[in-house]
């Protein structure tokens, strides 16, 4: 079950990370947020990122093989990166309607999937 907990926690972590890192770009179009200075945007993003860490740290602790998990450090990192791209892609297509997923993006994702294959290969 630990691999599944790790993956679920990584997904939750990446949702908060993506919102913290990129959500302010969309919020800047709203009147309330457009008048905020950069420091307030940074503080808001830090507040959101706090929840990212609340999921990321347990994910790595539960998932790490030396703590009884299923993944070595290399596997954890590559898994996290692929989850980041999946969450980022979904977020971008849902929130930023003017962005499109193009062939070069898909080709890049294929290479990342190949990276996962080679990192997990014994």
Image (cartoon, rainbow, N blue to C red):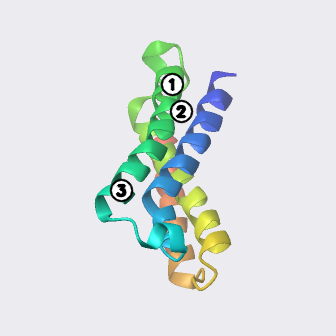
Task: Using the image, tell me which numbered label, if any, was put on residue 55.
Answer: 2
- Tell me residue 95's x, y (percent): 63, 71
Q: In the shown orientation, is residue 59 left or right of residue 42? A: right
Q: Residues within 10 Å of mark 1 (few under 14, many from 20)?
A: some
Between tags 2 and 3, which lies in front? 3
- Tell me residue 10's x, y (percent): 56, 39
Q: Nearer the viewer, residue 91 or 121?
A: 91
Q: Earlier in the sequence, mark 1 or mark 3?
A: 3
Rounded to the nearest angstrom, the CA distance separating label 2 from label 3 is 24 Å
Q: Is disc 1 in contact with disc 2, using a CB cutoff of under 8 Å? A: yes
Task: Using the image, tell me which numbered label, if any, was put on residue 119.
Answer: none
Residue 3 sits in which quadrant?
Answer: top right
On the image, numbered disc 3 is attached to which residue? 40
Q: Nearer the viewer, residue 43 or 10?
A: 43
Residue 57 sits in which quadrant?
Answer: top left
Q: Is residue 10 above or below residue 106?
A: above
Spot the residue most to the left: 39
On the image, numbered disc 1 is attached to which residue? 58
């Amino acid at each position: 079950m630990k691999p599944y907990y790790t993956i679920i926690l990584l997904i939750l972590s990446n949702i908060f990370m993506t919102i913290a890192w990129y959500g302010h770009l969309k919020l800047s179009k709203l009147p309330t947020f457009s008048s905020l200075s950069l420091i307030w945007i940074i503080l808001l993003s830090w507040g959101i990122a706090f929840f990212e860490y609340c999921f990321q740290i347990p994910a790595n602790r539960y998932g790490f093989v030396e703590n009884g998990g299923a993944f070595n450090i290399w596997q954890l990192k590559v898994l996290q990166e692929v989850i980041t791209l999946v969450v980022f892609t979904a977020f971008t297509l849902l929130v930023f309607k003017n962005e499109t997923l193009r062939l070069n993006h898909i080709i890049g994702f294929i290479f990342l999937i190949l990276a996962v294959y080679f990192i997990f290969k014994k």
